[in-house]
Image (cartoon, rainbow, N blue to C red):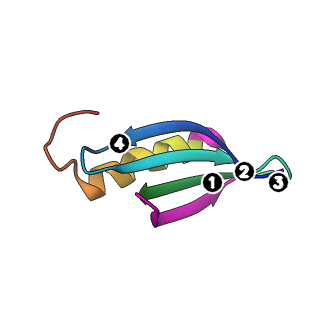
Amino acid sequence: MAEVPLARLWHFPDGTQCLLLKDPQAENWELRVVRGTETLRTEHFGNPIVAMEEAKQWRANLGDPIGEPS
């Protein structure tokens, strides 16, 4: 079975989005930032709450292109 995207944590108008994924055969969670078919960043976590907190930091570091919440 393939990984399962569980949530889109944030997105920007240019198509950049942050996804929280779970591989049903693994114990970890994946945080992935993509734009179209390109993966910009990815990291694995043992806890989804920690992954979601990290997603907030990634968003702040990338900066919202128009400065509005999405």
Q: How many marks on residues?
A: 4
Which numbered disc flags the more N-terminal residue, 3 or 4? 4
Mark 1 lies on residue: 30
In the displayed structure, would residue 59 be above or below residue 10? below
Taking the image as shown, residue 4 lies to the left or right of residue 50, namely right
Mark 2 lies on residue: 3
Mark 3 lies on residue: 26
Please identify the quarter of the rendering in which residue 26 is found.
bottom right
Taking the image as shown, residue 69 lies to the left or right of residue 45, namely left
- Amino acid type, residue under disc 2 in the picture: Glu
- For mark 1, does the 10 Å Cα neighbourhood hold few (<14), some (14 to 19), or many (20 or more) residues? many
Q: Nearer the viewer, residue 3 or 27?
A: 3
Q: CA distance from mark 3 to mark 4?
A: 26 Å
**Residue 42 x, y percent position in the rendering:** 53, 63
Q: Are marks 1 and 4 in contact (CB under 8 Å)?
A: no
**Mark 3 or 4, closer to the camera:** 4
The numbered disc on residue 11 is 4
Q: Nearer the viewer, residue 9 or 34?
A: 34
Residue found 45% across the figure and 48% down from its top: 18
- Amino acid type, residue under disc 4 in the picture: His
Q: Are marks 1 and 3 in contact (CB under 8 Å)?
A: no
Q: Nearer the viewer, residue 62 or 39?
A: 39
> Farthest residue toward the front?
37
Residue found 55% across the figure and 53% down from its top: 31
Looking at the rendering, the stretch of residues picked out in magenta corresponds to: 36-49
Q: CA distance from mark 3 to mark 2?
A: 9 Å
Residue 25 among those drawn in magenta: no
SS at circle 3: loop
**Residue 48 x, y percent position in the rendering:** 63, 41
Q: CA distance from mark 1 to mark 4?
A: 16 Å
Q: Are marks 1 and 2 in contact (CB under 8 Å)?
A: yes
Which numbered disc flags the more N-terminal residue, 1 or 2? 2
